[in-house]
Image (tube, grey):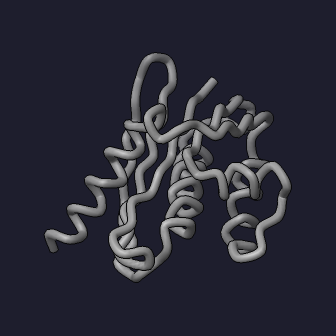
Amino acid sequence: MLKLYTDAATRGNPGPTGLGALIIYEQNQIQLKDNLAMATTNHEGEFDAAIMGFKYLMEHFAATETILFYTDSRLVSDALGKNHSKKFTAQLQTLTEYLDYFALVVTRWVPEKQNQGAHQLANQALRALEDK
């Protein structure tokens, strides 16, 4: 079983955005961070952070894995639950395709205070972008 936590940090909304993903498996951690130089909204960033995390999982883990996916974005969590998003159709479609790769994915919304690992990674990615 793998745990995936994702988050985005945006300065300005829209503005530069940092992405963070924390993967926990067998008492190990994988920390991922990236940034989007183009101005995006925080909602777009939340989808992109989840896509980044699932893309990594697809490239490094078997399709038979069970994934516990944690996000502090109600928009992402609700969109996955309903399989619908008015404004983020393309990102939802990509994310859904990635989730469908795995045998079982359980998505759970968590408060920001329970998502600090991914939150810190997203902020680090944003600071690195601003320092360029």
- The relative height of residue 70 versus residue 86 in the rendered view (above or below) is above
Foreground: 74 or 54? 74
Residue 34 vs residue 49: left or right? Answer: left
Residue at 66%, 69% in the rendered image: 91
Give the quarter of the image for residue 46: bottom right
Residue 59 vs residue 93: left or right? Answer: left
Residue 55 vs residue 126: left or right? Answer: right
Q: Position of residue 82 (x, y in %)?
A: 85, 55
- The relative height of residue 15 versus residue 10 in the rendered view (above or below) is below
Q: Position of residue 26 (x, y in %)?
A: 50, 18
All told, the count of numbered labels is 0
Residue at 74%, 32% in the rendered image: 64
Pick the quarter of the image with the N terminus: top right
Residue 73 vs residue 12: left or right? Answer: right
Q: Position of residue 88 (x, y in %)?
A: 69, 72
Residue at 69%, 30% in the rendered image: 65
